[in-house]
Amino acid sequence: MKFSLEIFRRKSSQRYIPEIDALRFFAIIPVMLVHFSGALLTYNADFDRQIIDQENIFRHALIHGNNGLYLFFAISGFILTLPFIKKEVKDMHFKNYYLRRLVRIEPPYLIAISLFFIVHIVLAEKSLAFLFEHYIASFFYVHMMIYEARPYILPVSTSLEIEIQFYLLMPLLLILLKKIDSKIWRGAIYSLLFACSFLVNLFPFHELNDFTRYFVAGIVAADIYKHEVFNRNKLWDLVFLITLPMFFIVNESLVKSFLLFFVLTSSLQTVYLKRFLTGQWITIIGGMCYSLYLLHYPLYHLFMRLFTNKLTLFESFEANYLFQAAIFIPLSIAMISLYFILVEKPFMEISQRIGKLRKTKRADDLDKRLVDSLPLTKSEDK
């Protein structure tokens, strides 16, 4: 039987844009690199984490990989805006929107936190009562609101709690944008949201206000992508090559927000880079980013707890990091790909079918209305 990489491809109920999966790749890989260094320093007895964090230039460079989280927020703003931005309010079916989001996101997340809840019980580092309380808080995406601390069961789910808040508010924003369907009105709303993200605590939710600017960057990119026509041009290749690394380097959030807009916009218009950005391996790994994001952090900590001290063969932090990362990051991706195939992808396909069923139902309803509006023939009238 011939093996096909198609088994690793993600499914979507929208038109597939491979460049978006490429951006997911550029978001998840830097996050994985920095989290691996943190796990290594947590368990490695040969390196003082406090000294490395303060003095090591290589570690400082890795820490910039956390900016990948903001790229994820911009991508979310883009993909959630895209299906609705040109629709009338009456055609925005948010029941279907919420159902697809629920089916797509919830089961892989709940299975992951349940799995690691059991792992924490086995490790017996905290009481069962403590673990259960934190598990329930994470189950309902309110851990940060209640404890004002990263989720204990699955620390990376901090960003998912922020994403869920955004998902819940997004339909209200879309309706507001379409109440007066003009570029000036939408531009005013975007500017207001962007300004409030810096100046006013607009949302009473933990940290959502601080990240709104990155969601807005994606929303504006989707608006322009839908309403404006850009010709592919090699200048867009240059914009992408400049803005992507700059985004990971700069620390100023205002500048990062504008860079995110240009990263998204330019990635969709490249000429020479198009083949690279739509390449098989980069889009496959990018398409698995949700499973990778859910599982990489606890896997790293498990691997480093068991193996980092046994595999410390060099004196420098950099050499040991590169050696161990070359082993355990590919191993983690291989293991997590099974989770993607067995858990995440089936729910992707269900979400996709829900989207198709909704489109079919709308088409059938339209056909019925057209038939009902036709005048009856004499024979039918009788």
Image (cartoon, rainbow, N blue to C red):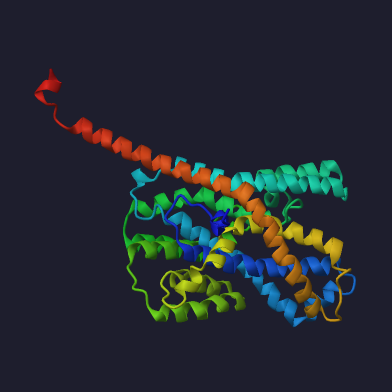
Q: Residue extending furthest front?
A: 1
Residue 168 is situated, as x and y percent measured from the top left of the image, at 53, 48
Q: Nearer the viewer, residue 360 or 218?
A: 360
One can see residue 216 in this view: yes
Q: Is residue 200 visible?
A: no
Describe residue 90's horizontal placement relative to residue 37 as left or right: left
326 versus 151 height, above or below: below
Residue positioned 79% across, 45% down in the render = 118
Choose between 204 and 325: the one closer to the eye.
Answer: 325
Q: In which quadrant of the rendered image does the C terminus lie?
A: top left
Residue closest to the far left: 378
Residue at horizontal 48 percent and vertical 66 percent from the top: 19
| Residue 116 locus on image (x, y percent) | 76, 49
Image mark count? 0
Which of the 4 quarters of the picture holds residue 184? bottom left
Query: Which residue is painted at 32% across and 68% down in the image?
Result: 229
- Which residue is at the far top? 382
Q: Quadrant of residue 94?
A: top left
Q: Is residue 136 left or right of residue 217?
A: right
| Residue 126, x across and y down, in percent | 86, 48
Residue 347 placement (x, y as % from top left) = 56, 45
